[in-house]
Image: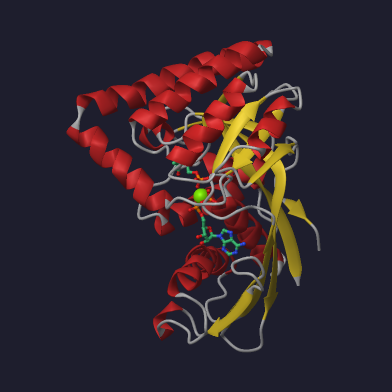
Amino acid sequence: MAVSSAPGKVYLFGEHAVVYGEPAVPCAIEVRARVGVEKRADSKLRIHAEDLSLDGFTVEYGGTADGPPDVDVSESLLTAAMGYVDEAIEQVRDVTGEEDVGFDVTIESEIPLGAGLGSSAAVVVAAIDAGTREFGTTLEIDELAERAYQTEYEVQGGQASRADTFCSATGGAVRVEGDDCRSIEAPDLPIVIGFDGGAGDTGELVAGVRQLREQYDFAADTVDAIGDIVRNGEEALEEGDLEELGRLMDFNHGLLSALGVSSRSLDSMVWAARDAGADGAKLTGAGGGGCIVALDPTDETETALSYTPGCADAFRAELAETGVKRLE
Ligand SMILES: Nc1ncnc2c1ncn2[C@@H]1O[C@H](COP(=O)(O)OP(=O)(O)O)[C@@H](O)[C@H]1O
Ligand SMILES: C[C@@](O)(CCOP(=O)(O)O)CC(=O)O
Ligand SMILES: [Mg+2]
């Protein structure tokens, strides 16, 4: 069996606009998904997802062509467990040429699902890495990131950027603009996360922004304006200017709200952080529900969030210097 882990991330700037070629700056954080892959004697795919329901569950089936497997969990959980993992396994087959081999895949993750912390990218990066290593092939990080991107692109119906997957594969802070992906220097940022306990549907939210952008000039201008904020943000990051970074994150959140991807609980958490004296706060990832990211070197924001109605969890996150980790 081969086991790999990969980190989640927050977007300091640029989600959604990155889908249309604007730059974005995500930053990997120390919450990880760990995926074990072992080849089987038969051609079945068995997915054991520890964290998809209270006690986790296991599905075993002959592949998507077989139709949905017969297990006692909701269809949305099943689709959730299978979509990204199925596609990641396709990538493993493509790399190794092993068309007919079955796999046991075990997923354990500390990353809340659909909450903007990049659980999908982390699961896909770790699954492709472990799956290929199970056959003795260790992919270069760039190829791993590219294949993980292809996986997200397929599952999200042709709408994805390289930001999440590149960040999860390489770790640290990265800058992504179209297919230009690079690591950048970042100071040790005082990142605080607020989580409303909910989730958003990435595919649906991305489709909503696309439609708005086609229908209204203001929305196309908003996407361009997010690009400007990201460019300013890169300068502030280089200078280690926390106050300016925070101000720009506030602007970025306002523009994401204008594009319709915030929510009442995300807005409440953003305002609680600002009121507590955070340098800035914004939603992270696709939105609709899930997490906000704030910058605050003091304990005030974390404390304020823990008393905010609608906030289910508040915690400090460390930058993950390392992306994929090859564990076994
Ligand atoms: N622990 C896990 N086990 C299996 N699949 C997972 C796990 N974590 C995430 N996923 C997959 O990723 C999807 C969530 O991805 P997405 O909507 O992009 O949100 P995010 O990447 O922000 O968490 C889940 O619906 C599921 O398909
Ligand atoms: C909205 C988007 O920019 C980021 C989505 O991030 P997440 O899956 O919600 O963590 C989509 C993408 O870049 O593929
Ligand atoms: Mg995702």
> Would residue 192 appear left or right of 94 to someone viewing this image?
right
Q: Quadrant of residue 238?
A: top right
Position in image of residue 3 (x %, y %): 75, 64
Position in image of residue 121 (x %, y %): 56, 51
- Residue occupying image coordinates x 39% and y 31%: 257
Answer whether residue 311 is visible to the viewer in this image. yes
- Residue occupying image coordinates x 43% and y 44%: 288
Answer whether residue 25 is visible to the viewer in this image. no
Which is more toward the observer, 88 or 212? 212
Which is more toward the observer, 316 or 29? 316
Which is more toward the observer, 8 or 290? 290
Quick check: 280 above or below 36?
above
Assign the N terminus to one quadrant of the image.
bottom right
Q: How is the image coloured?
A: secondary structure
Assign the C terminus to one quadrant of the image.
bottom right
Quick check: 198 above or below 284?
below
